[in-house]
Amino acid sequence: MIENEYDYKTMNEIEIIQANIYGYDKPGLAAELTEILARYDAFVLDIGQANIHSSLALGILFRTTRDKSGFIMKDLLFKCSELGLNIRFAPVEEADYAAWVARQGRNRYIVTLLGRRVTARHLADVSKVIFEHGLNIDAIKRLTGRMPLVPDENDREKSCIELSVRGKLSEEGRKSLQGALATLPEKGLDISFQTDDIYRRSRRLICFDMDSTLIHAECIDELAERAGVGAQVKAITESAMRGEIDFCESFTRRVALLKGLDESVMEDIARNLPYNEGLERMMMILKRVGYKTAILSGGFTYFGKYLQQKFGFDYVYANELEIENGKLTGRYVGDVVDGRRKAELLKLLCQVEGINLAQAVAVGDGANDLPMLSLAGLGIAYHAKPKVKANAQQSLSSIGLDGILYFLGLKDSQIDP
């Protein structure tokens, strides 16, 4: 009986055959077809199956001997006819098989297409860029649930297609490919390009900015409105987010304008924070699959702690406002959590959790998030300013926060109840 070792008299007796089977899917097909291979002691070298709607596409690459190959193909042909399936056979040369094996696991990348809808134009344009850079698509799968025929009236649909590609790509070639993907004219589509390595498959920590990332607001602007200095603070905030002025300087100037505001205002704002789309679903699933989560914010600890209690974040690092006699003093306590500090905290949390930086994810929208976005194994600019998107590894602008789950390779059918 043929096991894992060759027991043939000569290599000339070996035959490698690929069987491609397609037709209407039904339970038990794989069992009946592989039973024939087992009957003749054939050795399965590779097998793969895909289903679209009710249609089956099954490929089986097997090794046998010339004295048995004819019987195997005849029995498979008769069985497929009985089951209403079509089958085609293709011989594979040993040299071609050896070359194919040598390429396995090397130079593999993942391209993720994400938006409200992924269209044929999106797929065509992305596939063309991949081809023009010498890469080959060897697997395509849908990560989101099946698309309804009637669009959602609230436009809250999500569509995600993941492409597994392989080929040699220099650092210059990678930059060229990512640049080409970033400049595609299609609107409403986010495209992630990642190396498919052990770190991508073992992310363990996700660090988030808070204001305009987890929540659809800048808390300091909300406080400023209550203090009657909204226009002044907002102007400083926008300038800082664009990277035009130093964050520490802008933070000190903005906090000073809040002097005299009653502490009770903070509680009222916290209770009415507008959460960004997908936050609750994202946090539920991240906790379910064992991720550690952190808020690293240039905003305020008060609001970060509120989100921690509501959604279960593991860590919160933000700025502490000084309060005396129930009033804000216009000063803060401790060091400012700016871009540099966020990067330091990311490193610290990786040490605490005992993980490599490549296993960390960072998500933010402002210029002060760029240090941690560039440091993490996966940095995602979320609905970010143009400067931030241009300098981040990846960007997400088409859907809500739960789109991050697809960049991690999670699939709706695996994570939703």
Image (cartoon, rainbow, N blue to C red):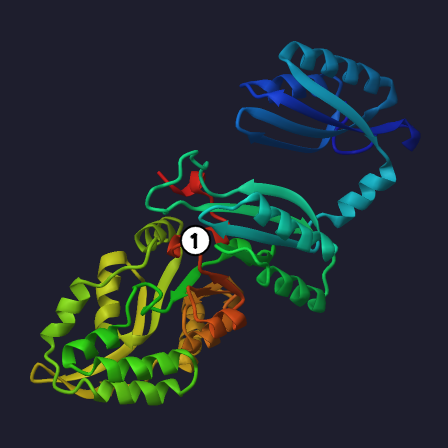
Q: In the image, what residue type sits under mark 1?
A: Gly
Residue 258 percent across, percent down from the top left:
18, 84
Q: What residue is at 21 percent from the left and 87 percent from the top?
A: 257
Report crowding for label 1: few under 14, some 14 to 19, many 20 or more residues within 10 A (C-alpha): many
Residue with the mark numbered 1: 403
Q: Quadrant of the C terminus?
A: top left
Query: Which picture quadrant has residue 400?
Result: bottom left
Residue 117's place in the image compared with 81, above or below, is below
- Name the residue nearer the viewer: 384 or 106: 384
Residue 134's place in the image compared with 317, above or below, is above
Residue 130 percent across, percent down from the top left:
68, 53
Asked whether, in this view, residue 398 is left or right of residue 107, the answer is: left
Residue, far left: 325
- Name the residue nearer the viewer: 151 or 325: 151
- Name the residue nearer the viewer: 353 or 292: 292
Residue 336 percent across, percent down from the top left:
32, 84
Q: What residue is at 46 percent from the left and 73 percent from the top?
A: 372
